[in-house]
Amino acid sequence: MKPRLQQKYMDEVRPALQQKRAYINAHQIPRMVKIVIHMGVSSALEKTAIDDAAKDLGSITGRKPVIDKSRKSVANFKLRQGQPIGCHVTLRREVMYEFFDRLVSTALPRIRDFRGLTPRAFDGRGNYSLGLDDQTIFPEIDLDKIKRHQGMDVTIVTTAQTDAEALELLKLMGMPFAEGK
């Protein structure tokens, strides 16, 4: 069975985009390709910080995170080559739609004083990035078991050629953007 948002994309969003933008070919219609979630961890923290971040990220996404290691030594940051500095997960297909649904419908509304996401966070090629200050907005995280609050970066990669197309796609998918003044 397909996820709810994937079915919505096929039934409602694709025809609406094709009608509004007058795409000739069905492959021109923008779609989401992948979602990358990244947690950076300070190297100054204790050694279990990276394991705790990976465990939290794994419980949020349902996938085992990849541990990111530094490529170079940087003396000013007290960083050595090969030292763990973060973790990330890449989600595609059904898992991507399930995470996007949880992000939009449950996690983002739990942010304190949330008034919508900024529509200026596109990269110029149709990809959207947002930073979350705390992992506790996800219902999968048990508040009694976390040791430290950890932020994360979420990047939504689309096939849209322009930021306007990607903004329209994400709005139709249900992403809550703040209204311009």
Image: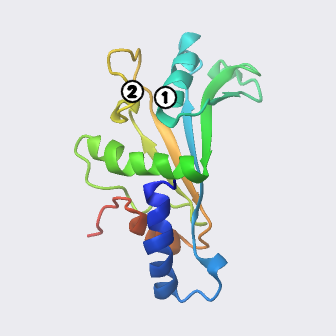
> Relative to 84, is 99 on the left or the right?
left
Distance from disc 2 to disc 1, alpha carbons, whole Å, reads: 7 Å
Residue 177 in the image: above or below residue 41:
below
Question: Which of these two is toward me, 43 or 37?
Answer: 37
* Residue at (76% x, 21% y) in the render: 82
Can you tell which quarter of the image residue 141 is in?
top left
What sort of colour scheme is used for the picture? rainbow
Say which mark, if any, is on residue 59: 1
* Residue at (60% x, 19% y) in the render: 43
Q: Identify which amino acid the numbered label 1 is placed on.
A: Ser
* Residue at (59% x, 10% y) in the render: 47
Residue 124 in the image: above or below residue 82:
below
> Relative to 162, is 116 on the left or the right?
left
Q: Is residue 66 visible?
A: yes
Q: Position of residue 79 (x, y in %)?
A: 68, 20
Say which mark, if any, is on residue 141: 2
Q: Identify which amino acid the numbered label 2 is placed on.
A: Ile
* Residue at (48% x, 48% y) in the render: 98
Total numbered badges shown on the rendered structure: 2
Question: Which of these two is toward me, 116 or 108?
Answer: 108
Instruction: Give neighbour class at mark 2: few <14, some 14-19, many 20+ (Cα, 10 Å).
Output: some
Indicate which disc, 2 or 1, sits on the residue closer to the N terminus. 1
Please report contact status of discs 2 and 1: CB closer than 8 Å, yes or no: yes
Helix or strand or loop: what does disc 1 sit on? helix
Q: Position of residue 87 (x, y in %)?
A: 61, 30
> Relative to 139, is 20 on the left or the right?
right
User: Furthest residue to the front?
Assistant: 1
Question: Which of these two is toward me, 90 or 62?
Answer: 62
Dividing the image into 4 quarters, which one contains the C terminus? bottom left
Can you tell which quarter of the image residue 138 is in?
top left
Q: Is residue 121 visible?
A: no
Q: Position of residue 85 (x, y in %)?
A: 63, 25
